[in-house]
Image (cartoon, grey):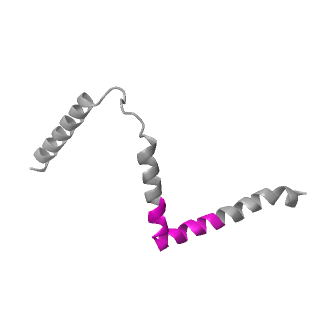
């Protein structure tokens, strides 16, 4: 019984893949999004971050770590002398 179910599942999977390959467009014909919706989405993201304390904490910690790491990297030639 297990073997027959396995054959049915693999047959169904191959049918789905072949149908997907047959209906997939050869070249993407979509145009890039226009600036209006993209700007709205960015503003919405900034609004979400400003209202989410947990994400704000993560971003502040990342910013501080990046600034400190950048300063250490910039001062490495002085230490090497």
Q: Quadrant of the C terminus?
A: bottom right
| Residue 7 rendering spot, x and y as whole percentages | 15, 41
- Residue at 84% x, 55% y is 77
53 to 3, vertically: above or below: below
- Residue at 66% x, 62% y is 66
Find residue 69 and report its image quarter. bottom right
Count of marks, rendered view: 0
User: Which of the two residues, 72 or 16, is positioned nearer the viewer here?
Assistant: 72
* Residue farthest toward the top in the current orientation of the protein: 26
* Residue farthest toward the left in the current orientation of the protein: 1
- Residue at 46% x, 63% y is 47
| Residue 5 rendering spot, x and y as whole percentages | 12, 47
In the shown orientation, is residue 2 left or right of residue 52? left
* Residue farthest toward the right in the current orientation of the protein: 81
53 to 15, vertically: above or below: below
- Residue at 46% x, 43% y is 35
User: Which of the two residues, 30 or 7, is positioned nearer the viewer here?
Assistant: 30
59 to 5, vertically: above or below: below
Report if residue 78 lies within the magenta region: no
User: Which of the two residues, 37 or 27, is positioned nearer the viewer here?
Assistant: 37
Dominant SS type (magenta): helix
Report if residue 59 lies within the magenta region: yes
| Residue 54 rendering spot, x and y as whole percentages | 48, 72
Q: Which residues are the magenta region? A: 46-64
In the shown orientation, is residue 69 left or right of residue 59? right
Find residue 12 and report its image quarter. top left
| Residue 6 rendering spot, x and y as whole percentages | 16, 46
């Amino acid at each position: 019984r297990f073997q027959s179910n396995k054959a049915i599942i693999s047959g169904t999977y191959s049918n789905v893949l072949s149908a997907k390959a047959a209906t997939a467009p050869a070249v993407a014909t979509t145009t890039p999004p226009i600036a209006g919706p993209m700007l709205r989405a960015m503003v919405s993201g900034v609004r979400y971050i400003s209202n989410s304390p947990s994400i704000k904490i993560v971003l502040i910690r990342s910013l501080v770590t990046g600034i400190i790491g950048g300063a250490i990297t910039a001062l490495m030639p002085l230490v090497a002398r």
